[in-house]
Image (spheres, rainbow, N blue to C red):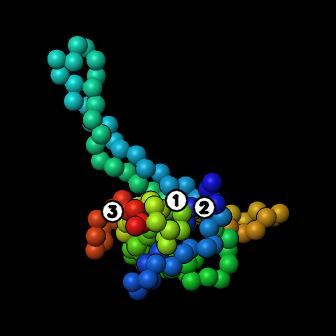
Amino acid sequence: MGYAAKCYRDVSGTWTEMTNVQDATQNDSMSEVEITSRADGGVKTFVPGLRELSFEYKGRNLASAELTALRTAYTARSAIKLRVLDGPIATAGTTGVEFWAAVFSRTADQSLDADQTFDYVLKPTVGASAMADVTIV
C-alpha cells in the first residue's frame, strides 16, 4: 500500500523521515536509444539509455523542518540528499533509491475549502555521490 512508503532526508548524517507527505509519486524511467541495423529485418530496435528519476510530493503547509529545508533548497538552488523507500528505513528488505536532489518546482494549492498544500518536484542533481538503488539489510 502507498501509505507504507517513506521518504527520508539526510540531516547531518542522520536519515529523518519526511512525515508531512500526503501524496507522493516516484517516477523512474529510461530513455530509448535506437540501435536499429539491417540485421533487424526492418524492425526498429532499442536499448535502455539514461535513467530519469523524479520524486513528486504534496505536503500540507505546516511549520516544519522539512518544508523549511525544501523551501531553502528551492530558493538557494541547493541540493538535499533523499532516500525514497517502499517501507521503513529500519526494516530489512525495504528497497528504494538514494540520491542528491534539487527542487525544481514548488506549487501552492490555496483552495477555499481545503488545507493549503505545496506540491514539490525533486530531481537528481550533482552531489557527493551518484544515485543508487538501495536495499535495507
Name the element at disc 2: helix
Name the element at disc 1: loop
Residue 66: image location, x then y, percent: 55, 78
Is residue 53 visible in the rendered image? The answer is: yes
How many callouts does the rendering have?
3
Give the Cα distance between marks 2 and 1: 6 Å
Name the element at disc 3: loop
Q: Residue at x 42, y 66 (%)?
A: 136
Count neighbours of disc 2 (C-alpha within 10 A) and say few if under 14, some if 14 to 19, many if 20 or more.
Answer: few
Residue 119: image location, x then y, percent: 60, 63
Figure check: 26 above or below 43: below
Of the two numbered discs 3 and 1 on the same chain, state the one appearing first in sequence: 1
Q: Nearer the viewer, residue 1 or 24?
A: 1
Task: Pick out the residue farthest to the top.
Answer: 41
Residue that badge 2 annotates: 4
Residue 27: image location, x then y, percent: 47, 51
Residue 25: image location, x then y, percent: 55, 55
Q: Name the amino acid type tagged 3.
A: Met
Residue that badge 1 annotates: 86
Is residue 118 visible in the rendered image? The answer is: no
Give the Cα distance between marks 3 and 1: 17 Å
| Relative side of 33 to 24, left or right | left
Marker disc for residue 131: 3
Q: Quadrant of the N terminus?
A: bottom right
Give the Cα distance between marks 2 and 3: 22 Å
Of the two numbered discs 2 and 3 on the same chain, state the one appearing first in sequence: 2
Q: Nearer the viewer, residue 77 or 7?
A: 7
Label 2 close to label 1 by CB (< 8 Å): yes
Q: Name the amino acid type tagged 2.
A: Ala
Q: Name the amino acid type tagged 1.
A: Asp
